[in-house]
Amino acid sequence: MIPNLTHAATMTKPTQLPLTPEATPLIRVASAHKSFALPAGGQFHAVRDVSLSVRAGDIFGLIGKSGAGKSTLLRLINLLERPDRGTISVGGRELTALSKRELRAARANIGMIFQQFNLLQNASVFDNVAFPLRLRGGLDKARIAQRVEECLALVELGAKSDSYPARLSGGQKQRVAIARALASGPAVLLCDEPTSALDAETTRALLATLRDINRRLGVTIVIVSHELSVIGDICNHVAVIEDGAIAEQFALADAARLQHAALTTLGRELARHVAAGMAGIAGAIGAADTRKEALHA
Ligand SMILES: Nc1ncnc2c1ncn2[C@@H]1O[C@H](COP(=O)(O)OP(=O)(O)OP(=O)(O)O)[C@@H](O)[C@H]1O
Ligand SMILES: [Mg+2]
């Protein structure tokens, strides 16, 4: 569990979060297209006219085979990749319409973590987390130190402040990356295969941390993974990506109904995986109830 702390968003202007599901989604990708020039000439269309809405508070999964375009689509959301066509809006602001300076400020509202952690190897844990705050400017040393401490406490790494990344386990490195991503108080956290370099137990712990960050801080999460268990464990909504397009999307609450009805093989596999988990939980609850009844008989 994460300790109580002042909400991350205290560091930024309050985001205009939609209050109802009908309101404007927090993230809106509209007819976005991205192609890359091939070395031999011609174009490779990595993302093809994708439209996507993510509601505030969602944990939204992007699943698909290798090369399907998941990372490119994720990177479009914070404009690490700029779409050739289409628009990207986050928190009601159209990022694709902003100047470079405005975009830099808007990005404080969108944190990101990666499979390989991407920490600064020659900087301490403290300095890694402080990095985006120093880059942004406008905060004195004491305020930066306070914020870094808050963020490290959030991922239960307060004791590692002076360590260097080389001395940390993979799970700890990813927690530092999460602390760094949350330092500027974003409303959105983008995660690109955040557990693919971790073992099963560390994966479970990291997913629990992400779930806690979503529930307790209200941070909306978009997570890319090719692992059914990861998506099934943490997401409430999923989009299956095939050949740069959304093949289908659904709420995981509908998994039981979609075991045979989902459109894609991956969608059906995911629905089956989630439904089996739900049945397992229902079974365990049922068994506990039976035991309770037996005790009271
Ligand atoms: N900068 C780039 N230049 C050229 N081609 C690229 C570039 N980035 C991605 N691609 C191509 O676009 C396609 C989609 O790549 P992307 O990294 O989005 O896939 P992915 O679904 O994340 O795959 P993986 O699961 O392997 O990470 C791939 O064929 C990839 O080679
Ligand atoms: Mg990828």
Image (cartoon, rainbow, N blue to C red):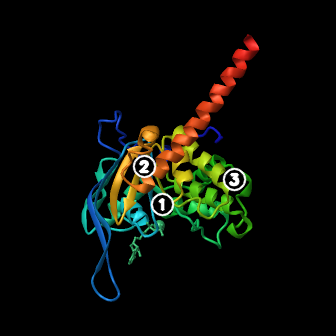
The 10 Å Cα crowd at callout 3, few under 14, some 14 to 19, many 20 or more, is few
In this orientation, does residue 7 appear? no
Q: CA distance from mark 3 to mark 1?
A: 38 Å
Q: Secondary structure at mark 1?
A: loop
| Tags 3 and 1 touching, CB below 8 Å | no
- What is the three-letter code of the residue carrying label 1? Gly
In this orientation, does residue 31 appear? yes
- What is the three-letter code of the residue carrying label 3? Glu
Q: CA distance from mark 1 to mark 2?
A: 37 Å
| Residue annotated with mark 2 | 238
The image's mark for residue 201 is: 3
Residue 200's place in the image compared with 293, above or below, is below
N-term-proximal mark, 3 vs 1: 1
Q: Nearer the viewer, residue 180 or 171?
A: 171
Q: Nearer the viewer, mark 3 or mark 1?
A: 3
Residue 19 placed where, x, y %? Answer: 35, 34
The image's mark for residue 55 is: none
The 10 Å Cα crowd at callout 1, few under 14, some 14 to 19, many 20 or more, is few
User: Residue furthest toward the bottom?
Assistant: 40
Q: Quadrant of the N terminus?
A: top right
Q: Secondary structure at mark 3?
A: helix
| Residue annotated with mark 1 | 137
Residue 43's place in the image compared with 272, above or below, is below
